Image: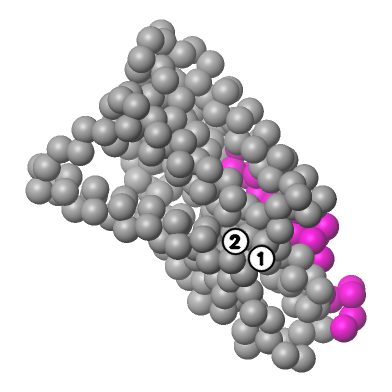
Amino acid sequence: MALLDMKSSNPALGEKTFKELSYSYDKSSAMTARGTMLKLGFMLILMLASAFYTWHAFYNNTANIQAFIWGGAIGGFVIALVLIFKKEWSPFLAPLYALLEGLFIGGISATYNFVFAASMPNIITNAVGLTASVAIAMFLLYNFRIIKATEKFKSIIITATAGIAIFYLIVMVLRLFNVPVAFMHDSSMLGIGISLFIVAIAALNLILDFDFIEKGEQMGAPKYMEWYGAFGLMVTLVWLYLEILRLLSRFASNK
C-alpha cells in the first residue's frame, strides 16, 4: 500500500508516524477512530486520578509539590520521546504518560488555583470547561467538514506551531540570562493577544490530529496505534489546557 502523505504539527502525530508500519486488512487487528477515542477516555481518567492526588498533596502539605511538577514534566517528556521512536510500546507507555502528566497538571493547577483564589476562584473549573468545550467544538467542525484539513491548512498550522515553539525557546534562553520578558507574564493587551493566538493555534492542531487518526483508520494501521493516537491527542489537549489557564490568569490579574 502506498504511504499516506500526512502532516501534523503535533510531534507525536508527525508526517512520518505511519511509515514502516505493518498494515492490516483485518478490522479486528487494525486501528479505529472509535478505539482511539475510548483509549483517550481511559487515559484522561488516569490523568485526572493522578492530578487529584497531586492537588490533594498540595493543599494538605503532604509532599513537595515542586517534585511532583518537575517529576511529572520531565518523566512525561522522556516517555513522549521514547514513544515517538517506539510506537509499538504505546499500550504500555501511553497510560504511564497519562499518569505522569496528571502529576504535572495537578501541581500546576493547584498552584494557579491558590495564587488566583481571590481574583478568580473558579479558574481551574473554567479552564477545564473551556478546554473540553473547545475540543468538542473542533471535533464537530472537523466531523461536519466545516474546517477541512487541506494541505494549505496543514502548512499554516504547522508553520505557526513551529513559530510558537521557537518563540518559547527564545523566551526560556532569555530567562536563563535574567533578561525579563514582561509581556509573557503580565496582563497587557500584547500579552493577552499572544495568549489568544496561541490558544487558537493549539485548538486548530486538534483538527490535524483528528484527520491523522481518521487516515490511520482508513489505512488499516496496527491496533497499537490507537494508543499512540490517544497519546498524541493528549499532548495537544494538555497544551491547550495550559494555554487557556495562562490566558485566564492574565484576565484574573486585571481584576
Q: What is the number of the mark on residue 153?
A: 2
The residue under label 1 is 150
Q: Looking at the picture, how far across and down is residue 185, in whole percent? A: 29, 31
Residue at the image position 53 percent from the left and 16 percent from the top: 122
Which residues lie in the magenta part? 25-48
For badge 2, the amino acid type reads Phe
Is 31 left, or right, of 43 in this rendering? right
Residue at the image position 77 percent from the left and 45 percent from the top: 140
Is 44 left, or right, of 79 in this rendering? right
Residue 205: name its quadrant.
bottom right
- Looking at the figure, which quarter contains the C terminus? top left
Q: Nearer the viewer, residue 204 or 114?
A: 204
Asked if the stretch drawn in magenta spans residue 30, the answer is yes
Cβ atoms under marks 1 and 2 closer than 8 Å = yes
Q: Nearer the viewer, residue 76 or 157?
A: 157
Q: Nearer the viewer, residue 239 or 81?
A: 239
- SS label for mark 2: helix
Residue 178: name its quadrant.
top left
Q: CA distance from mark 1 to mark 2?
A: 5 Å
Q: Main secondary structure of the magenta part?
A: helix
Is 110 left, or right, of 99 in this rendering? left
Residue at the image position 61 percent from the left and 30 percent from the top: 130
Asked if the stretch drawn in magenta spans residue 120, the answer is no
For badge 1, the amino acid type reads Thr
Examine the rendered structure and indicate whether residue 115 appears above or below residue 154: above
- Looking at the figure, which quarter contains the N terminus? bottom right
**Residue 103 visible somewhere in the drawing:** no
